[in-house]
Image (cartoon, rainbow, N blue to C red):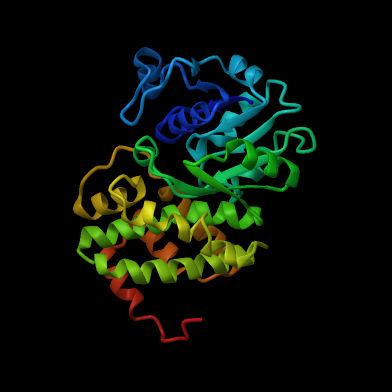
Amino acid sequence: MKISVLGCGRWGSCIAWYLDKIGHDVISSGLENAPEFIQLKEHRKNDYLSFPASIGITSDLREAVGHAEVIVISISSQHLRSYMTDIAKHDLSGKTIVLCMKGVEVTTGKRLSQVVGEFVDESKTPIAVWVGPGHPQDYVRGIPNCMVIDSKNQAVKEKLVSEFNSDLIRFYLGTDLIGSEIGAAAKNVIGIAAGILDGLGFTSLKGALMARGTREIARLIAALGGNEFSAYGLCHLGDYEATLFSPWSHNRRFGEDLVKGISFEKLAEGVMTSKALYQLGQKYGVDLPIVKSVYLVLFEHVNAEERIRSLFERSVKKEF
């Protein structure tokens, strides 16, 4: 299968490496002046992995789109709309777009597949999402994991799972696109909360964070029309180990550095996602105390430790 991976950051480069490894014809595409693209173009490696000679590297979007039967997009979620404006200038008919990114558009509250859906005719250019746990640092060492591919198009979903499955990544067929996308986006917000707990020395609270975080995201998924049990699957709860505990998690590290007063320079998708989910919670009348707390700490500059303690002052209620 001919595949172009648009975006060559940490995850995008790992996807290109993985899809080449399992036998696909892969092009990795990035912005000409982006440091991560320049590093791959000049040295065919980055801080996480090395590209074999079989992977093409280009900054020419026309070349990348023209090559592909499947276009995999892995960029910052808040830049997706502007990027799709460029991608949609090319003929996308007969191609499948796979989103390997986790977020909610903060200006509209839309899921990322909905954003892409504004630019394509899904009967001609179906859209899928690829979500779930994993870090490049583990995959390149041969440590396996499980992930999910979801789509409104059953045939496309089944074909992608068949083509992408291997002994390194076991793919499952997603059954709830809303839940898969919201759950995947929300785990980054919970990851920031976990980092805040680590930074404050409250690490033992992460068990409670996992239980209650999953519960509130399940409520939001249900309110949006999805299956609340999706929150307990690979897209959300199943991604907690990689996001709430791993030293490689950008979102966890961002939260920890935040309360320690350290500047974190890498992308933490959960920052803007916390705002988007907080707004969705208000719009749909869903109680999201953890999401709200992260939002207040990040955007209203509320003291993190005081906000955590205020959660313990909430009225007593049944767990379920």
Residue at x-position 48% and y-position 56%: 186
Q: How many marks?
A: 0
Q: Is residue 17 left or right of residue 303?
A: right
Of 74 and 157, nearer the camera is: 157
- Residue 173 location (% of width, % of height): 63, 51
In the image, residue 212 sits, relative to residue 199, either above or below, namely: below
Q: Is residue 49 left or right of residue 61?
A: left
Residue 153 visible from this viewpoint: no
Residue 25 visible from this viewpoint: yes
Residue at x-position 55% and y-position 26%: 23
- Residue 203 location (% of width, % of height): 25, 64
- Residue 147 location (% of width, % of height): 52, 48
Of 114 and 133, nearer the camera is: 133
In the image, residue 178 sits, relative to residue 80, either above or below, namely: below
Residue at x-position 30% and y-position 29%: 47
Of 40 and 1, nearer the camera is: 1
Residue at x-position 40% and y-position 66%: 210
Q: Is residue 316 left or right of residue 120?
A: left
The N terminus lies in quadrant? top right
Q: Quadrant of residue 73?
A: top right
In the image, residue 131 sits, relative to residue 311, either above or below, namely: above
**Furthest residue in direction right, as rendered:** 123
- Residue 199 location (% of width, % of height): 22, 58
